[in-house]
Image: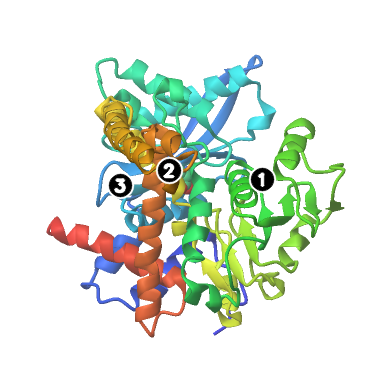
Amino acid sequence: MTRTTEPSFRESVDLMFNRAAALMDLPPGLEEKIRVCNATYTVRFGVRLRGQMHTFVGYRSVHSEHMEPVKGGIRFATAVNQDEVEALAALMTYKCALVEAPFGGSKGGLCIDPREYEEYEMEQITRRFAYELAKRDLINPSQNVPAPDMGTGEREMAWIADQYARMNTTDINSRACVTGKPLNAGGIAGRVEATGRGVQYALREFFRHPKDVAAAGLEGSLDGKRVIVQGLGNVGYHAAKFLSEEDGSKIIGIIERDGALFDTDGLDVEAVRQWIVKHGGVTGFPDATHVPDGGTVLEEECDILVPAALEGVINLSNADRVKAPLIIEAANGPVTAGADEILRKKGTVIIPDMYANAGGVTVSYFEWVKNLSHIRFGRMQRRQEEARHELIVSELQRLDRYLGDAWSMSPNFKAQYLRGAGELELVRSGLDDTMRIAYQSMAEVWHDRSDVGDLRTAAYIVAIDKVAKSYRAKGL
Ligand code: GLU
């Protein structure tokens, strides 16, 4: 049956969950237990600004506590509401399960337009919100660990971490109360780029499977592929930058709030980003065609469409006109349940959000572990690794001398081989491994089961199975 009305975001997530759960053999009652959100806390608090009291509304929703702490970002946006926060919290549960980050799912949000406030005002508001959450253990290293999301970043996470530390002066693990912090405040190398990097690694893994690439009607590698990106925020920017600079993809379209830029020869992502930082939007960017009604660019011919902004942007009103054979959901929930149905029928391959944007929470996991272990990754072993490599290199140098002109070491070999991995290399390696393994677990279900026709259903099956197993292990 084709849907004619659009469900809410949370209903959309539930519908996708139900489709997968119906194909599983879950014990009676467990399906509902997993699907529902455990609790959502709403807070209304006042902050005195510019001589008067301002009331703000915020949320922290806990979807599943099958593992603790629960994890998920805090979003600052005017459209934040309970339905959205609950949908996002549910997605966090499935995302963490799929990539084996040992967390339950949670999400928070504050109804605010951060652009309307000065930095010191934002600090006051963020600290007060953090205080409200922390005093109820909705921020806590062992119970609930927030992170950045839309409208928040390192700056807000540093304020939250400091607020928690002020309230818990003897907690030796206080830094682990939030992730996505700046490096000098307990953060980890590579967290800012992590979600975009994860999108790149997800696509690289997809293109390592020629059968899957063929299912999308594509062939070859990422090199030369035409990509359209919606949203040049933290996720979209890094994904587009890495794909164009490292994989040879051509970013032919960038959609932003004030319209889209389009150029079939490929856009310079860094130049567009700098233009946005300086001018607040893409309008006026000199080296491309500006399309005022940016949303229409979602419907342009391309190989890969990367929605990296809001939920619900591909919906019943435009899904049948979307031509991209491959969509990778860098945002959470960009395709509604109704649009998903239309696209599946058309044969569009969708790499689902819970996998595609899991790079952020994966590196958050590494940061949390780093905070709890109180040591930077690589600190103990790096020089020892280099010393062992030095031994091999000196043996090879001896061989080099002995063999004379018959053989010699490649020019860069010594420098490359000698360098032990620092934190950034280790983070990237851990992220790459996570994205490869999670893709393979999802693709296996997609290929092996004749009743599973798409990657999203496969991802839900893998995730729900993991959550169910951990409930069963607890005797529930
Ligand atoms: N907000 C990000 C997400 O939606 C990151 C969550 C985290 O790192 O905990 O996945």
Residue 474 is situated, as x and y percent measured from the top left of the image, at 14, 55
SS at circle 1: loop
The verdict on label 2 being within 8 Å of ligand 1 is no
Residue that numbered label 2 is attached to: 428
Q: Which residue is at 53% across, 72% downward?
A: 213
Q: Which residue is at 25% across, 20% downward?
A: 172
Tell which quarter ligand 1 is in. top left
Q: Residue 103: which numbered mark, if any?
A: 3
- Mark 2 or mark 3: which comes first in sequence? 3
- Mark 3 or mark 1: which comes first in sequence? 3
Q: CA distance from mark 2 to mark 3?
A: 20 Å
Q: Residue 232: which numbered mark, if any?
A: 1
Which quadrant holds the C terminus? bottom left
Please say which color scheme the image uses. Answer: rainbow
Residue 70 is situated, as x and y percent measured from the top left of the image, at 32, 44
Q: Is residue 409 above or below residue 298?
A: above
